[in-house]
Amino acid sequence: MKKLFLSHIALFLCCVLTLSCDQESPCPTCENYTNAFVIGFDPCGASNPNSGMVGFVINIPSREDTVIAYNFPIGIYEFPEGYFSNRNNPFFPEQASLDFPIKIKYRYPRVDEEPNMGLCGGNYVPHPLFRNINEIILLSVIK
């Protein structure tokens, strides 16, 4: 009797586990992290690059895409302030293109969410990258 009971429990657990693995996860943040690199910045908000108020340009090699995120967490990297001195070139020096690897979970903004791209004042002419760049919202970032 005890063996029959245990076999029913085992069969029930196998069925539950099998059925739960076939369901698509409704949680977009449950997916694996994506490898990426921080390769530049939005010059309109770069007065203090380590303040958390900067839009960072992120390259996602697996998607062959370059995006921008305005919610990059403070403290992941201490970016050299010299990288932010040229407002006409939003990219870090070429030799630094692989210096800031990250793993990210992200999503694209919903239609009802306002974009975060700042407006530049004065005689600044935005780099062509910012005419067609997609913004992402970082859900999680690790080194």
Image (cartoon, helix red, strand yellow):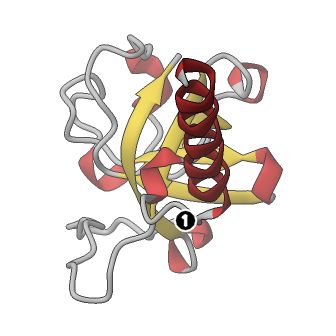
Which residue: 67% across, 50% down?
18
Read off the residue under disc 1.
127
Vertical position of residue 53 compared to residue 93: above or below: below
Quadrant for the N terminus, please.
top right
The amino acid beneath tag 1 is His
Q: Nearer the viewer, residue 18 or 59?
A: 18
* Number of numbered discs overlaid on the protein picture: 1
Q: Is residue 78 left or right of residue 13?
A: left
81 is higher (above) or lower (below) than 41? above
Q: Is residue 30 visible?
A: yes
Residue toward you, 19 or 27: 19
Quadrant assignment, res 74: top left
Q: Residue at x 77, y 58 (%)?
A: 63
Where is residue 13 drawn, in percent x and y? 56, 39
Residue ID at (44%, 13%):
80
Residue 29 horizontal/vertical position (percent): 44, 50
Q: Is residue 114 above or below residue 116?
A: below
Q: Nearer the viewer, residue 44 or 99?
A: 99
